[in-house]
């Protein structure tokens, strides 16, 4: 039997504020997203993600790196700073102008050569057909691609990169978000996530967590299309990547985060 919405929950308190808020995209005015990734369980999650990316940079010493959806660079920058080899030339493809500016400012401050593409991965790969990279990486951003865009993007990356590393959550398929069992589990996880924040709970809750999670119920405001780690691995193989490996990275209130590594077909 599904539990009723607890009227004393943080979710119930924040829901009216969320519904009354003017909604811009969660990455277009990214103050809430910036606070979200710098607090709660994200501190450890990002520490582990950056550490994993550093190890991959040290292993491959790429001359060229593409980061798909780097946000403000919170996972990318520490990885580049801690890597022991020479910094690669970095391409950033990020549709949020505000986040891209923060990431490029940080790269600039570190003196790391880079090019910023203020567009989507789909668009970059179509408009720059000759571009190749030694390494492509993406943390929590490939989930932004709707399923019909994901296949073509991964296929293009498989042809045009030597190596790929992806960090994503392992999210079981949600056949129906109105299913009471899923909704109940969703509410419990949401409550846990919201309570990881103290002073910034309202900002993070109404500006990021609620809009993202409630996007499951309204296709026009949906911001992500997560799926299981097995499905991610399958997608990579279908796209032409080989040697696909998966590693558990970190437990997290929403779902566990995993690192996927794969070999692309670009050998030139
Ligand atoms: C959850 S955030 C992750 C940001 C960053 N990688 C990190 O780990 O903090 C998802 C990012 O993907 C970006 N994004 C959304 N759609 C995209 C697309 N089609 N191509 C590239 N990036 C996209 C968003 O603007 C946002 O910066």
Image: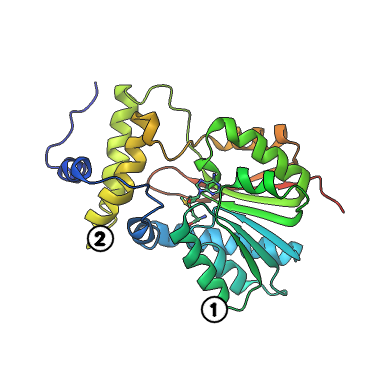
Furthest-right residue in view?
Answer: 268
**Residue placed under numbered mark 2 in the picture:** 200
Q: Count residues near mark 2 (Cα–Cα under 10 Å), then give few for <14, some for 14-19, many for 20+.
A: some
Q: Is residue 134 above or below residue 107?
A: above
What's the residue at 72%, 41% (across, down)? Answer: 156
* Disc number lying in front (2 or 1): 1
Element marked by disc 1:
helix
What's the residue at 29%, 45% (across, down)? Answer: 23
What's the residue at 32%, 56% (across, down)? Answer: 32
The answer to whether residue 247 shows anywhere in this view is no
Rendering coords of residue 211 (x, y %): 32, 42
Query: Which of the image's four quarters has the C terminus?
Result: bottom right
Q: Is residue 101 above or below residue 135?
A: below
Side of 188 relative to 62 (left or right): left
Q: For ligand 1, tell me if the residue under mark 2 lies within 8 Å.
A: no
Q: Who comes first in sequence, dot 2 or dot 1? A: 1
Q: Quadrant of residue 93?
A: bottom right
Q: Is residue 78 above or below residue 213?
A: below
The answer to whether residue 142 shows anywhere in this view is yes
Side of 43 relative to 54 (left or right): left
**Residue placed under numbered mark 1 in the picture:** 109
Side of 23 relative to 226 (left or right): left
Taking depth in this image into account, of 96 and 82 the one nearest to the observer is 96
The answer to the question of whether label 2 and label 1 lie on touching residues, with beta carbons closer than 8 A, is no
Furthest-left residue in view?
Answer: 7
What's the residue at 33%, 21% (across, down)? Answer: 179
> Distance of mark 2 from mark 1, alpha carbons?
27 Å
Rendering coords of residue 19 (x, y %): 21, 40
């Amino acid at each position: 039997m599904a539990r009723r919405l607890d009227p004393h929950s943080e979710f119930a308190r924040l829901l009216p504020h969320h519904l009354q808020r003017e909604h811009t995209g969660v990455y277009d005015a990214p103050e809430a997203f910036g606070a979200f990734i710098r607090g709660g369980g994200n501190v450890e999650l990002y520490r582990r993600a950056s550490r994993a990316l550093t190890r991959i940079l040290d292993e491959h010493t790429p001359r060229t790196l593409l980061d798909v959806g780097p946000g403000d660079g919170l996972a990318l920058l520490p990885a580049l700073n801690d890597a022991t080899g020479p910094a690669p030339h970095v391409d950033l493809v990020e549709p949020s102008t505000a986040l891209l500016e923060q990431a490029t400012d940080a790269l600039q401050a570190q003196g790391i050569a880079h090019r910023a593409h203020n567009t989507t991965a789909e668009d970059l790969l179509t408009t720059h057909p000759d571009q190749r990279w030694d390494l492509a990486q993406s943390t929590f951003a490939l989930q932004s691609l709707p399923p019909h865009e994901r296949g073509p993007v991964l296929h293009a990356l498989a042809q045009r990169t030597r190596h790929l590393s992806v960090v994503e959550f392992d999210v079981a398929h949600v056949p129906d978000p109105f299913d009471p069992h899923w909704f109940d589990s969703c509410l419990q996880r949401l409550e846990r996530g919201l309570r990881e924040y103290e002073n910034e709970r309202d900002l993070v809750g109404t500006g990021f967590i609620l809009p993202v999670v409630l996007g499951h119920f309204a296709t026009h405001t949906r911001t992500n299309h997560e799926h299981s780690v097995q499905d991610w691995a399958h997608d990579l193989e279908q796209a032409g990547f080989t040697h696909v490996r998966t590693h558990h990275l970190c437990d997290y209130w929403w779902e566990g985060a995993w690192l996927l590594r794969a070999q692309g077909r670009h050998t030139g």
